[in-house]
Image (cartoon, helix red, strand yellow):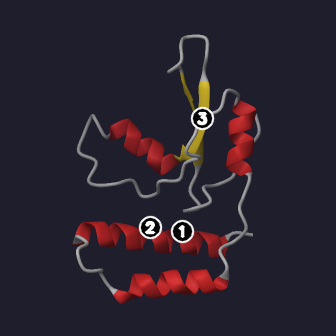
Amino acid sequence: MTNLLPCPFCGGEATLTEDYVLGPNEPLYAVMCQSLADWYETRFTKQHGGPPICGGTLGRAFSSRSDAIAAWNRRAPAIPPNVREAIRKIADYGMPLGATNYDWRGWRDTALTCLDAQEDRP
């Protein structure tokens, strides 16, 4: 099995999942950030205290392990410096009118974590 690269959003560990939603002989494979997988695993069994630390996922499933891994390991270009700067300014500006404090803090923390991971990657 090919190694999974770390999550491109938070730098955390990634995990390959296998599900049989189409039937017992038709597995589907997906890759997601381990923090999201942990949240899915616990959301119905105990209080999870809010959203996952990172929502990194491919957003789709594949019929083969190798296709899922290849899609996860494919990386987009780094966020351009002017976009990083704009996101940091928005995060520093404060909560927009109509947003709840919980929503705003979650977005801000996730956005800044993603930016930090982008800046730390090779």
Closer to the N terminus: mark 2 or mark 3? 3
- Left or right of 85: which side holds 66? right
- Left or right of 110: which side holds 45? left
> What's the amino acid at mark 3?
Ala
Asked if the residue under mark 1 is in contact with the one under mark 2, i.e. CB atoms within 8 Å, the reply is yes
What residue is shown at x 25% (from left), y 80% (from top)?
A: 97
Q: Secondary structure at mark 1?
A: helix
> What's the amino acid at mark 1?
Cys
- Left or right of 17: which side holds 39? left
Camera-nearest label, 3 or 1: 3
User: Residue 7: horizontal and vertical position, in percent?
Assistant: 60, 55
| Residue position for label 3 | 61
| Residue position for label 2 | 110
Identify which residue, 81 or 51, lies in the foreground.
81
Q: CA distance from mark 3 to mark 1?
A: 23 Å
Q: CA distance from mark 2 to mark 1?
A: 6 Å
User: Residue 93: horizontal and vertical position, in percent?
Assistant: 37, 88
Camera-nearest label, 2 or 3: 3
User: Residue 53: horizontal and vertical position, in percent?
Assistant: 42, 58
Q: Secondary structure at mark 2?
A: helix
Q: CA distance from mark 2 to mark 3?
A: 24 Å
Residue 3 can be seen in this image: no
Identify which residue, 95 or 36, lies in the foreground.
95
Closer to the N terminus: mark 3 or mark 1? 3
| Residue position for label 1 | 114
Q: Residue furthest front?
A: 98
Q: Which mark is residue 43?
A: none
Residue 63 can be seen in this image: yes
Q: Residue furthest top?
A: 24
